[in-house]
Image (spheres, helix red, strand yellow):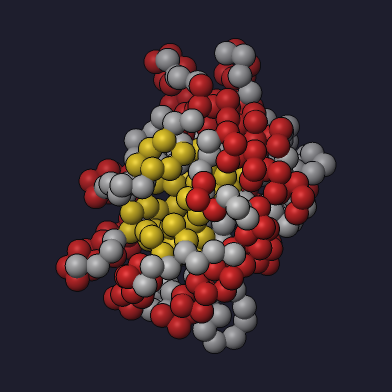
Amino acid sequence: MEYRRLGRSGLEVSALGLGTNSFGKRADESTSIRIVHQALDSGINFIDTANIYAGTESERIIGRALEGKRRLAVLATKAGLVKEPGPNGRGSSRYHLQRELEESLRRLNTDYVDLYQIHTFDPLTPLEETLRTLDDMVRAGKVRYVGASNYAAWELMKALGISDRAGQVRYVSTQTSYSLADRTPERELVPMCLDQGVGIIPYFPLAGGILSGKYAAKDAAPPGSRADKDPGFGRFLNDRTVSLGQEVGRLAAERGLTPSVLSLAWLLSRPAVSTVIVGATGTGQLEENLRSLQVRLDADLAGKLEEISDSFRLGEPFATYRLT
């Protein structure tokens, strides 16, 4: 397994991380626990979840899976998106974050998380309040490092400036949609992170499965796929993204690779990327994704991938999650 620093912090994380959005939803509890154990056995130490995944089931299942194995994991969770209706049920206020951290710790069956991430920028809460709360959590020993998610480059830069001025802990990482089907982070976020020493943690590295080659057409969802299980995912399927997936599949076949492995290998080669979150609904899928760590792109292949995905640097992100 390859390990990388998370941004410019001293924390080492596996180049591939385990995403757990499917736990308790598309993967049942016993399957999810097997996936966690397989990931740890393979050298993956970064496990990412959130307080809202599968209605909190993901955190609970991870807590069970890590019984007796907690020291092997760099455990990351998040808060800030809508958890429940009513006042204080969302956002990054001190009130909401402190309550959500305590509940996450209980579900995860641990007394600390290694990386606590703000799930999205909160336009209604002063950044000073959010960042002071995170600093207090670190000082209390309940959080080791802090990160952001779904922040625009200017929002992240503003947060770093506030933390630096106040002498508080700063964000060491940021999660963003990033893949061959979404290169929009390269316009502003990647240069900013390189300059400021912030590690990028891509989510949707396979564009929700579009880059795995499973979609032959925008209205043809294979049984068991994300588009089949989640009707809302259909908004990501269009002629442009499906065509890209087919092009990636063609290049992968020429090299004896699967489209998923090639797509992940490309993302692992990008600057500022610390760890790539890869979800799995079965142990075989995880085993396949691990093959990407052995792939090195030559100049010809890298150039072809650059060419077919260049237009995806423009326009809107493939996905972003914001408070409204």
Viewer-proximal residue among 240 and 52: 52
- Residue 134 in sight here: no
Residue 5 figure quarter? top left
Residue 93 placement, left or right of 63: left
Residue 191 locus on image (x, y percent) = 28, 44
Residue at the spot x=75%, y=43% of the render?
225
Residue at 33% over, 54% down? 172
The residue lying toward the viewer, choosing from 72 and 266, is 72
Expressed as whole percent of the image width and height from the top left, the position of residue 68 reads: 60, 52
Looking at the image, residue 161 lies above or below residue 188: below
Q: Is residue 135 visible?
A: yes
From this viewpoint, which residue is outermost toward the bottom?
A: 87
Asked if residue 128 is positioned above or below residue 314 in the image, the reply reads below
Residue 107 coordinates in the image, percent (x, y) = 62, 67
State the residue at coordinates (68%, 67%). 55
Residue situated in front as seen by the camera: 233 or 107: 107
In the displayed image of the protein, which residue is found farthest to the left? 165
Instruction: Classify residue 216 as left or right of residue 118.
Output: right
Image label count: 0
Residue at image location 43% in from the left, 43% down from the top:
13
**Nearer to us in this view, 185 or 161:** 161
In the image, farthest residue toward the right: 223
Residue 224 place in picture, x, y as percent: 79, 44
Q: Identify the image quadrant of residue 57.
A: bottom right
